[in-house]
Image: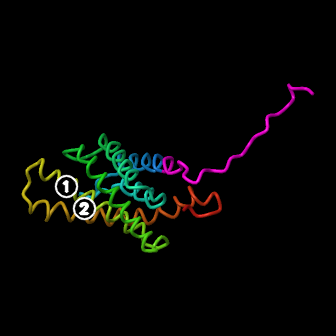
């Protein structure tokens, strides 16, 4: 028997039920979100928050635990601090944690109510995650800058609502292609 010509036998192991695919999906989508967040121009005071749209997609696809969602929000907040165009970039950490937790709670609630395949689930998740995140961020900014309450309610919150709608549309439009890319390769839907 010639040992030099023997080829090793490859063993294929099936993926574990609780794989770490969510980590790869999260990292890739957050990276894309940070790049788009950095290069997106401000048009009329409105810029889509691509990072929120991307973690809303991730959370919608992976249905993480609340502690994982908290981690996703924390990392998302940290990654956009350097590219933030705001007067208080560190406010992004708190606001993205709140946004990611909102997305996770909504996804869990919709799954619990049997709305896993509800067509507008991505829009709802992206919209409300953005509204909560933007509301928290602008409220922090209001406190830091000592702005009157009516500036926050009449000027800042309407912009948050517009960005929320924009992010809802982005989340909805990108959800199905991202789902196909990451989860349909195995010929089955991700559970």
Q: Is residue 185 left or right of residue 30?
A: right
Mark 1 and mark 2 in contact (Cβ < 8 Å)?
yes
| Residue annotated with mark 1 | 138
Dot 1: what SS? helix
Which of the 4 image quadrants contains residue 103? bottom left
How busy is the neighbourhood of tag 1: few (under 14 within 10 Å), some, or many (20 plus)? many
Residue under the point 13% across and 53% down? 142
Q: Earlier in the sequence, mark 2 or mark 1?
A: 1
Q: Which mark is residue 34?
A: none
Residue for point 23% across, 62% down: 159
Q: CA distance from mark 2 to mark 1?
A: 8 Å
Say if 52 sits above or below 166 in the image. Answer: above
- Tell me: residue 37, above or below residue 124: above
Residue 35 shown left or right of residue 154 in the figure = right
Q: Could you tell me residue 111's position as x and y percent?
A: 45, 69
Q: Where are the magenta residues, as a range?
A: 1-25
């Amino acid at each position: 028997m010639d040992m030099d010509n023997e080829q090793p036998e490859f063993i294929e192991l099936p993926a574990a039920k609780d794989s770490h695919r969510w980590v790869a999906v999260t990292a890739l989508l957050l990276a894309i979100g940070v790049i788009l967040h950095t290069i997106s121009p401000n048009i009329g005071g409105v810029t889509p928050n691509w990072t929120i749209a991307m973690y809303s997609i991730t959370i919608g696809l992976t249905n993480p635990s609340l502690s994982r969602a908290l981690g996703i929000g924390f990392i998302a907040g940290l990654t956009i601090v350097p590219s933030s165009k705001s007067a208080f970039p560190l406010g992004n950490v708190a606001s993205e944690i709140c946004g990611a937790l909102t997305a996770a709670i909504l996804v869990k609630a919709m799954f619990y109510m049997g709305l896993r395949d509800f067509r507008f689930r991505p829009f709802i998740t992206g919209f409300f995650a953005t509204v909560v995140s933007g509301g928290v961020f602008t409220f922090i900014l209001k406190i830091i800058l000592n702005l009157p309450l009516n500036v926050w309610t009449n000027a800042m919150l309407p912009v948050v609502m517009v960005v929320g709608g924009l992010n809802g549309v982005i989340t909805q439009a990108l959800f199905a292609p991202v789902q196909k890319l990451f989860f349909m390769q195995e010929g089955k839907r991700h559970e």
